[in-house]
Amino acid sequence: MTSETGNRLATPAWPDSEDGPPSRQAVLVAVAAGLGYMFDAYVVNIYSFVLPLIAITFALSTTAQGIIGSVMLLGYAVGTFCFGWAADRFGRKNTLGASILLYGVTTAASGLAPGAGSFAALRFLTGIGGAGELSVGVPYTTEVWPRRSRAIGAGGIIFSLYAAGAILALLASLVLARQP
């Protein structure tokens, strides 16, 4: 954003008042980004919650379990940079959607992975997509949210949904653990 008077930021891209209530579009952006964060928290946490079941299914050594867990973090490193660059180049809305689509599809596919290698590859791709959502969701929300209430949009909505995703992963793992 450019400076209007040297110390004041230019008007946001959307027609919100800097001090008024958020527009419907701003709320939708925060909720969409927050839902992305919620599913990202689910993806990050479900692995550790059901790791004993995954280890049995794929007959994984403790070393292999650690590598598969770490490969997602490598994907996060790649995805944060790549999706951040893409958001600046192609726009936040489309980039956010692409990142959510990527990690949604790869998360679903990882549940059907036939072996440890394909599971690890899908976790890597999930990390790329998840990091894209993390690196684009908050900046996009703060750009469209009124200045005086940005903490509610970017912090309150988005990060409360992140916590809900972690709780959802815990509940899902409890259901999975009870299966015969």
Image: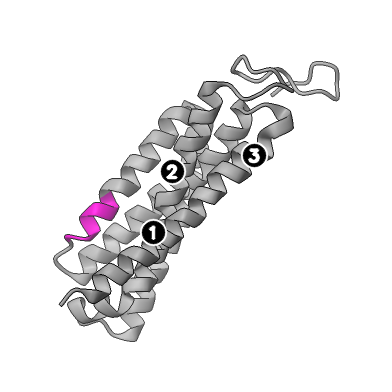
Left-right relation of 164 to 63:
right
Left-right relation of 72 to 109:
right
Which of the two residues, 169 or 85, is positioned nearer the viewer here? Answer: 169
In the image, is residue 100 above or below residue 107? above
- Identify the element where label 1 is drawn: helix
Residue 80: image x %, image y %? 50, 48
Instruction: Compare marks 2 and 1 and give the one earlier in the sequence.
Output: 2
Q: Which mark is residue 21?
A: none
- Identify which amino acid the numbered label 3 is placed on: Ile
Q: Which mark is residue 152?
A: 3
- Identify which amino acid the numbered label 2 is placed on: Leu
- Identify the element where label 3 is drawn: helix
In the image, is residue 168 above or below residue 90? below
Report which quarter residue 149 is drawn in.
top right
Residue 64: image x %, image y %? 31, 79
Instruction: Compare marks 3 and 2 and give the one earlier in the sequence.
Output: 2
Left-right relation of 85 to 116:
right
Of marks 2 and 1, the one in the foreground: 1
Distance from the alpha carbon under mark 3 to that under mark 2: 15 Å
Report which quarter residue 6 is drawn in.
top right
Residue at image mark 2: 35
Q: Please tell me how crowded label 2 is: few (under 14), some (14-19), or many (20+) other residues with Cα within 10 Å.
A: many
Residue at image position (25%, 81%) is: 60
Magenta span: 106-112
In the image, is residue 79 above or below residue 44? above
Q: Which mark is residue 168?
A: 1
